[in-house]
Image: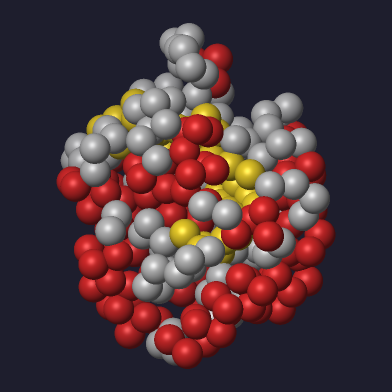
Amino acid sequence: MRYESWAPFYGEIRRSFGFAFEREELAAARLEALLGEPARVEPLARLRPRLKGRDAIVVGAAPGGGPPPLWRLAPSEPAPALLAADGAAAACLAAGLVPTVVVTDLDGPVPAQIAANQRGSLVAVHAHGDNVPALERWVPEFPGELAGSWAGPPRSFLLDVGGFTDGDRAAFLAEELGARRILLWGFDFATVEEPTAEERERKLRKLAWAQRLLGELDRTGRSPLFLWRRDGRLLPYGSAESSTR
């Protein structure tokens, strides 16, 4: 998604959650400084060969989601690409699946993401106003290929193709890079497990935004978008049933 299309959503999100743009900019600048020189080079160009023309399975971290049952899909050439959203990297590795890409703002189990990176996953690290300490703690620990991202206006070394949470941001990335189709596994917009009522309310607000943004991607994108349900069905994202979960 071009920034001029994304910007109105980004502005509404910042107003809704009270995100200060100055903090977002500081986080982006800090991430740029932490990334090594290879991670600054043409991030979209480095990512495109991993996803273009392939089915992209975006693995979310919804409660009970687990790793995707790849054996249920018909064989395809090329093989599907796995995009793990933050904590879903751990579930993938536990099942012997190495994600093609990990999309993360570093608030999940980061050691699993580092392990995936060591085994060949490209990790797209996202900067926002609340995660500068996590960026400083973890970015230097990744041994493999990295890319940086943020949600603001284009910057030379950082991606911004749309998306708010790790899951929907991964789907936007797959669309931008020419995925054949996008399958969402482990997505649930209504179930959360945060310990306090305040945290649950905030998480549900974020998931409502993720659901809305994926709807926009479904309407405007070129890659067909599906919800992959646990019973094996692939539901077009815009169908009445899929839009409720």
Judging depth in this view, the residue of 31 and 134 nearest the camera is 31
Q: Position of residue 139 (x, y in %)?
A: 73, 64
Residue at x 37% of width, y 81% of height:
14
What colour scheme has been applied to the protein in the rendered image?
Answer: secondary structure
Residue 17 position in % (x across, y down): 40, 82
Residue 11 % position (x, y) = 30, 78
Q: Residue at x 52, y 51 (%)?
A: 43
Residue at 70%, 70% in the rendered image = 34
| Viewer-closest of 233 and 46 | 46
Side (left or right) of 237 relative to 178: left
Number of marks in the rendered image: 0
Where is residue 189, by image quadrant? bottom left
219 vs 33, left or right, is left
- Residue 203: image location, x then y, percent: 48, 68
Image height of 229 relative to 220, above or below: above
Q: Nearer the viewer, residue 105 or 87?
A: 105
Q: On screen, 175 above or below 42?
A: above
Q: Quadrant of the N terminus?
A: bottom left
- Residue pictured at 34% horizontal, 64% vertical: 209
Tell me which corner region of the image, top left, top right, bottom left or bottom right, holds residue 228: top left
Residue 155: tell me if it is visible.
yes
